[in-house]
């Protein structure tokens, strides 16, 4: 927030959006009504100190600005607030980072169809790492079982309960492909999703309004909507989180794979890559000529799904 401003940055962004008079009145009226409710609770003489602090933090969160345009100081206060809110609500501590993209890094992914056996270790590791809803069985990754000689996703099974690998079949994983020209970003009416300098397409879950335009625009079925508040047992919560990554989400927002940016930006592999028992998944820096993914792109016959759409996904498939 600008030091000379008297309004929370989120409120400033709301008030400066180009909207018609009716929408503006509804937005401001509803926002102020809820915000005043938080403020009243924070000042209540009969509320406990913890309750007043929660109300104050809720007030700050409700009028929070878009993370993309926050100052470094605002980002710092935002993650500190998330950490404190979790502690007040659960009694447990989490670490939320706001690590930015590293210079001269553009992440890419390659999937070796010849090696995937459909074991689903990647799916389970992703769910655990990224604090995904256990109740709905949400999964960013899907493993598709195709019959040999056919690659038809309309006929493929991605919810199979039998011993794998099945005779006469092969397996392909899909997830967010982090397109260089992401249609999901173009359609978001509030700019809650964007592509970071390292190529990772992210979502500000506090700014998302749940319209699901991005889901409709994605040609790869990569985004997931929370129809209810996600359930993650306390003992299973991954406490090392990133604001734009695996932090705990809420009802009514869209989420997706982020190439585990809480790991990849720290120099580690995404959870799915690390968990794959057959080495079918390869991840790395496309700008590094010595990286394994660059070797794959230079030496294997690779392809991408729906290349004719011009989305330029940073996710390739190949076979040995």
Image (cartoon, rainbow, N blue to C red):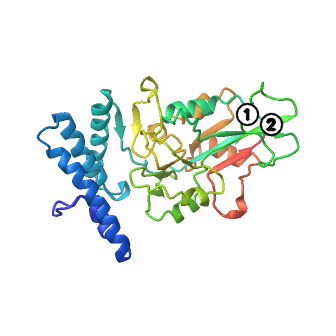
Which secondary structure, mark 2? strand
Which residue shows up at 81% across the image and 49% down it? 152
Q: Is residue 252 above or below residue 170?
A: below
- Point out the image quarter for the N terminus: bottom left
Which residue shows up at 52% across the image and 61% down it? 185
Which of 292/194 is in front?
194
Residue lying at the far left of the rendered structure: 45
Using the numbered discs, state the Cα–Cα distance from disc 2 to disc 1 in whole angstroms: 8 Å
Which residue shows up at 32% across the image and 27% down it? 92
Which residue shows up at 28% across the image and 54% down it? 34
Q: How many marks?
A: 2
Q: Quadrant of residue 212?
A: bottom right
Residue at mark 2: 170
Q: Residues within 10 Å of mark 1 (few under 14, many from 20)?
A: many
Which of 238/311 is in front?
238
Q: Are marks 2 and 1 in contact (CB under 8 Å)?
A: yes
Q: Position of residue 95 (x, y in %)?
A: 34, 34
Left/right of residue 10 with respect to residue 119 in the rendered view: left
Q: Position of residue 79 (x, y in %)?
A: 31, 43
């Amino acid at each position: 927030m600008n030091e000379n401003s008297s309004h929370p940055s989120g409120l400033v962004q709301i008030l400066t959006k180009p909207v018609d008079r009716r929408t503006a009145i509804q937005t401001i009226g509803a926002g102020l009504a809820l915000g005043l409710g938080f403020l009243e609770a924070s000042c209540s003489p009969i509320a406990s100190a913890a309750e007043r602090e929660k109300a104050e933090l809720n007030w700050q969160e409700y009028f929070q600005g878009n993370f993309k345009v926050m100052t470094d100081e605002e980002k710092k206060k935002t993650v500190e607030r998330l950490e404190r809110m979790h502690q007040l609500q659960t009694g447990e501590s989490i670490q939320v980072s706001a690590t930015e993209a590293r210079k001269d890094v553009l992440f890419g992914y390659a999937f070796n169809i010849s090696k995937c056996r459909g074991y689903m270790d990647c799916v389970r590791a992703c769910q655990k790492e990224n604090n995904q809803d256990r109740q709905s069985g949400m999964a960013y990754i899907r493993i598709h079982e195709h019959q040999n000689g056919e690659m038809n996703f309309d006929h493929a099974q991605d919810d199979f309960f039998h011993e794998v690998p099945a005779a006469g079949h092969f397996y392909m994983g899909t997830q967010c492909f982090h397109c260089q020209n992401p249609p999901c970003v173009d359609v978001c009416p509030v700019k809650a999703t964007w592509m970071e300098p390292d190529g990772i397409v992210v979502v500000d879950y506090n700014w998302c309004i749940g319209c699901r335009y991005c889901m409709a625009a994605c040609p790869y079925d990569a985004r997931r909507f929370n129809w209810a508040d996600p359930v993650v047992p306390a003992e299973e919560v991954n406490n090392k989180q990133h604001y734009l990554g695996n932090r705990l989400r809420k009802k009514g927002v869209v989420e997706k794979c982020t190439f585990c940016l809480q790991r990849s930006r720290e120099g580690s592999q995404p959870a799915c890559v690390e968990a794959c028992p057959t080495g079918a998944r390869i991840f790395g820096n496309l700008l590094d000529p010595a990286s394994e993914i660059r070797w794959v792109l230079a030496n294997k016959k690779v392809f991408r799904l729906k290349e004719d759409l011009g989305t330029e996904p940073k996710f390739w498939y190949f076979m040995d």
